[in-house]
Amino acid sequence: MAEARARQRGGNAEDVSAERLAEAGLRFEVDGEIATITLDRPEKRNAQTFATWSALARIGENLPGQVRVVVVKGEGPSFSAGIDLRMFTPEGVPGQGSFSSAATNGDTDIAQSVSKAQAGFLWLRRPEIVSIAAVQGHAIGAGFQLALSCDLRIVADDVKFCMKEPALGLVPDLTGTKPLVELVGLAKAIDICLTARTVYADEAMRIGLAEKVVAGSDLEQAVRDKIAELLSTNRDAAIATKRLLQGAHGRSLEEQCAAEGREQAARLKALFGG
Ligand code: CAA
């Protein structure tokens, strides 16, 4: 059954075997309607590599159809210290190459690598699911962007968000710039990124980066509570509503009203139609 669903999405259940994911520093568990992805290299503060991103993409391709909520969390003291800094050395990460060698191969190679990496993040926004980042400690660079790729962020009071890329001479390129601007506004996004400063819990809550701040020991329970709330609504209505909300920014008021009408017509047909 899981294999059939995986094939339907163009995936392959073998790709998300515990062994293969462990090689990429990830764990993936599905419990009914809830899937949990755990960054599981705490001794390296869950630093991310090409393998992490391609494994995340494979999880997206193989996500069982019944899953409604995806939790992304990090083992240990930090959610994620961002990109594995070995990727900027000529040696790179064994078996995975490096950005510095990709840079000598030309723009097409780099653009392709970036686009492949982004696939690991993009699926977390699908209307069919709600993704929640449970964030404690450092969420730096790619770690910050992974948290931004989720629909909701529930954070521990020791959270430290930092968009470090500009300090390293780079830009944030793992899908994080758009949600950051949408969440906090252009001026605050410029401030956060171009200073590479740390955003602590109080500010994260105040500027809309976090939905909720709790003590570290309460993080798991806070996520469980939010999941229970999310699962209490009708799934098809939740999907249609998320689709509407996601599309709102790009539509005029009139277009949005028309989209609401179309979605509601489909809902009413499904609920009361013959
Ligand atoms: N890459 C590889 N290894 C890392 C790492 C990273 N990003 N972050 C931490 N580690 C390793 C450390 O080297 C150390 O390994 P050893 O025990 O073998 O020495 C181990 O994890 C523990 O690290 P610390 O002792 O430093 O742990 P800490 O809790 O005192 O500090 C930290 C945590 C503040 C996150 C600090 O480790 C740190 O500053 N890390 C680097 C952060 C960084 O610059 N990330 C890159 C951001 S840019 C990006 O992600 C995107 C992009 O460029 C495209």
Image (tube, rainbow, N blue to C red):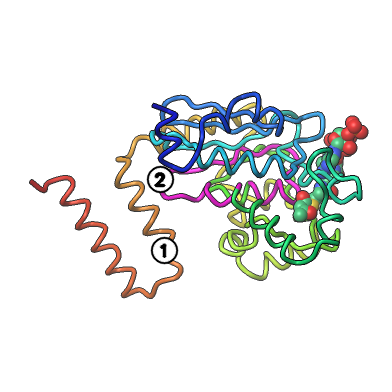
Is any part of residue 214 visible from this angle?
yes
Question: Which label lies toward us, 2 or 1?
Answer: 2
- Give the extent of the magenta segment: 120-146
| Label drawn at residue 161 | none
Residue 123, image x, y percentages:
52, 48
Residue 269, image x, y percentages:
15, 51
Callout 2: SS: loop
Residue 28 shown left or right of residue 99 in the figure: left
Q: Is residue 30 above or below residue 160?
A: above
| Label drawn at residue 247 | 1
Tell me if residue 206 is in the magenta stretch. no
Quarter of the figure with residue 190: bottom right
Residue 183, image x, y percentages:
57, 59
Residue at position x 62%, y 54% in the image = 206
- Crowdedness near tag 1: few (<14), some (14–19) or many (≥20) residues, C-alpha within 10 Å: few
Asked whether disc 2 touches disc 1, contact meaning CB atoms under 8 Å apart, the reply is: no
Residue 258 shown left or right of residue 119 in the figure: left
Residue 239 shown left or right of residue 118 in the figure: left
Viewer-closest of 67 and 213: 67
Ligand 1, what quadrant?
A: top right
**Circle count:** 2
Distance, label 2 to label 1, CA atoms, is 14 Å
Which residue was labeled with disc 2? 128
Three-letter code for the amino acid on which mark 2 is drawn: Glu
Viewer-closest of 255 and 201: 255
Tell me if residue 125 is in the magenta stretch. yes
- Crowdedness near tag 2: few (<14), some (14–19) or many (≥20) residues, C-alpha within 10 Å: many
Viewer-closest of 204 and 48: 48
Residue 166, image x, y percentages:
81, 62
Q: Quick one: label 2 or label 1, which is nearer the N terminus?
A: 2
Residue at position x 33%, y 73% in the image = 255
Is any part of residue 198 visible from this angle?
no
